[in-house]
Structure formats: structure tokens, C-alpha cells
Image (tube, rainbow, N blue to C red):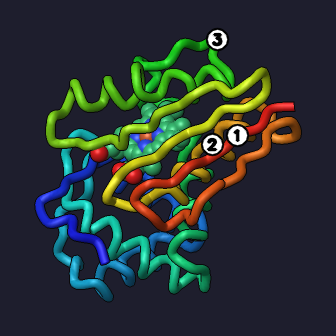
Amino acid sequence: MHSLTGDTMHGSIFVFLKRFVEYKHNYNTWVDILEEVGLRNRVPYQMNEVYPTSELFTIMSAAARVQGVSDPVFQEKFGEFLVPDLLLVFKRFIDPSWRTQEMLLHIGSHMHAGIKRENEATNPPPLHVSKVGQNMLVIDYHSRRRMAGFAVGIIKGLAQYFDEGEKINVLPATEPNAERVQIRVAFT
Ligand code: HEM
């Protein structure tokens, strides 16, 4: 189980989760899920707030059950889905010339660092990205939130977004549901 008491996450992720559920199903499903998990009276999630990470997990698990997939598969699909929204909402941290590889090389210094700077209550995961040889990036994910499946989804989503899906292979090198996970990204 997670011990995430007191941990908060950026509102954008909650807003995108609602969009994902609405895209896969519809608004009623979102309302049903909130009702089922005891969040019926929740004030609507806003982009510029933070919310308990435990709420995100509760809603993701309920939505995974509705879709009939496991939690890690759900997180991956959600990560893949939110990339276009993520790039739009946080374009201030992104150089328009970057493609998948440059994006990955700048997450820590630009996107995640920018998010932390703007809002202390967020906790974007440290992702140590190293270049191994010409064609491989190794990403070390470390977070007690255990959302490496989400990371894998975001990487796949980036590759699709930049039309590089054919030449990029994402290979979780270690067990994906852990606090520390190594992800290899091969470029051909
Ligand atoms: C492309 C631009 C990106 C933006 C703008 C972005 C933004 C964010 C934001 C706002 C959060 C919520 C953080 C919080 O409230 O604590 C987050 C979390 C996260 N991001 Fe990113 N991110 C980007 C790229 C990536 C990439 C490429 C990966 C994977 C390699 C990644 C992996 C994650 C993960 C796994 C989380 C969930 C929190 C956790 O595991 O601790 N992000 N990101």
C-alpha cells in the first residue's frame, strides 16, 4: 500500500484524469466514480490547486475497475492520453524545437523543476535521465507514489505526439510497480 498521507499533487493531473474518464466513457461515469469512492461533494478540481494524491489513486483504481484493466495498465493508458494536454498547458517550460529525446533530457531541469518552482506543494518525481551510447536513454524513476507505469505512458504518448512511435521502444527494465524503476528508451 502507499503511505501518501499529506502528499499533494498538481490539479492539472486531476483535471486530465476527469478528461480521460469522460473520453473513455462519459461525464456520468465520472460522477458515478466520485459517488462510489465517497467524493460526490468534492469541489470540482482546478488546474491551479493541489489535491491529496490519495484521491487520485482512489479515483484511478475505481476507473481501472470500470475499464476492466489493472492499475498499472490504467496508469500507462492515462499517461499516454494526457500528453497533448500536458504539452499545451505547460508550454512555457518547453522549447518548441524539442522532440521526444530532447523532451526526456529536459524533464528534470525544465518541466518538473518549473512546476515545483511555481508550486511548492507539488512533488514531481526525480527522473535521472542518462544517455547510454548513441541510441539509448536510461531513465531512473524514484517516487514513493509508485507511478512508473504513468511515466511509461507519458514516454509512449510523447513518441506518438511527435510521430516517432515507429522508431522508439520503451522497455521497463525493472518491476514497474516499485518506488525505484529503471526505464530504457531505445531510439532507432
Ligand atoms: C513533457 C512535459 C511534462 C510536464 C509538463 C510534466 C508535468 C507533470 C506534473 C504537473 C506532474 C504532477 C506533479 C505533482 O503535482 O507532484 C507530473 C507528475 C509526474 N510526471 Fe511529469 N511532466 C512531463 C513529462 C514527464 C515525463 C516525460 C515523464 C516520464 C518520463 C514524467 C513522469 C511523471 C510521473 C511518473 C509523475 C507522477 C508523480 C510521481 O510519480 O511521483 N513526466 N508531471
Q: For residue 91, which numbered disc appears in the image? A: none
Neighbours of disc 1 within 10 Å: few (<14), some (14-19), many (20+) = many
Amino acid bearing label 2: Ile
Q: Please state if 160 lies on the left or on the right of 79 as rendered.
A: right
Give the mark nearest the N terminus, 3 or 1.
3
Mark 3 C-beta closer than 8 Å to ligand 1: no
Mark nearer the viewer, 2 or 1? 1
Give the mark nearest the N terminus, 2 or 3.
3
What's the residue at 40%, 20% (across, down)?
Answer: 109
CB atoms at circles 2 and 3 under 8 Å apart? no
Amino acid bearing label 1: Val
Neighbours of disc 2 within 10 Å: few (<14), some (14-19), many (20+) = many
Q: For residue 97, which numbered disc appears in the image? A: 3
CB atoms at circles 2 and 1 under 8 Å apart? yes
Mark 2 C-beta closer than 8 Å to ligand 1: yes
Gap between marks 3 and 1 measured at Cα: 20 Å
Gap between marks 2 and 3 measured at Cα: 17 Å
The C terminus - image quarter = top right
Q: Please state if 128 lies on the left or on the right of 99 as rendered.
A: left
What's the residue at 17%, 75% (across, down)?
Answer: 41
What's the residue at 61%, 47% (across, down)?
Answer: 183
The N terminus - image quarter = bottom left
Q: Please state if 148 lies on the left or on the right of 9 as rendered.
A: right
Residue picked out by circle 1: 185
Residue picked out by circle 2: 155
In the image, 175 versus 85, the foreground residue is: 175
